[in-house]
């Protein structure tokens, strides 16, 4: 079992945050300036890292990012 960690939006992620997530976290922070003042939480599910912002934005290892509930999806139906 791996314990998670928290850090402030805009701050340098802790060393426990995998390199594969760091650039994507920075990208998400650039796209979500209204989330400043929030916090990220790093957890692990089945050995895979998951970073979640207080607004619901989720960045998972292996290239997936889920939008926050109030973000518009990119695709039109």
Image: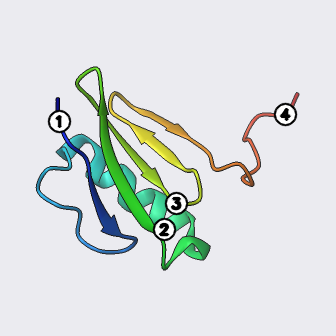
Of mark 2 and mark 1, the one earlier in the sequence is: 1
Q: Quadrant of residue 47?
A: top left
Residue drawn at the location 46% of the way across and 65% of the way down: 29
Residue 3 vertical position relative to residue 71 in the rendered view, above or below:
above
Label 2 belongs to which residue? 30
**Mark on residue 54?**
3
How far apart in space, not on screen, are marks 4 and 3 (Cα)? 26 Å
Q: Is residue 54 left or right of residue 4?
A: right
Residue 52 image position (x, y, % from top left): 44, 49
- Say few, some or many: other residues with alpha carbon within 10 Å of mark 3 (under 14 / 14 to 19 / 20 or more): some
| Mark 2 and mark 1: Cα distance apart in space | 28 Å
Helix, strand or loop at label 1? It is: loop
Which one is closest to the eye, mark 3 or mark 1?
Answer: 1
User: What is the C-alpha distance between the residues marked 4 and 2?
Assistant: 24 Å
In the picture, measured across the screen, residue 14 lies left or right of residue 29, that is: left
* Quadrant position of the N terminus in the picture: top left
Precedes in sequence: disc 4 or disc 3 = 3
The numbered dot on residue 76 is 4
Quarter of the figure with the C terminus: top right
């Amino acid at each position: 079992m791996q314990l998670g960690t928290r850090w402030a939006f805009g701050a340098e992620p802790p060393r426990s945050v995998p390199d594969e997530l760091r650039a994507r976290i920075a990208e998400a922070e650039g796209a979500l300036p209204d989330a400043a003042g929030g916090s990220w939480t790093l957890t692990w599910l089945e050995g895979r890292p998951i970073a979640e912002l207080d607004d619901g934005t989720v960045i998972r290892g292996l290239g997936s990012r889920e939008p926050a509930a109030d973000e518009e999806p990119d695709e039109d139906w």
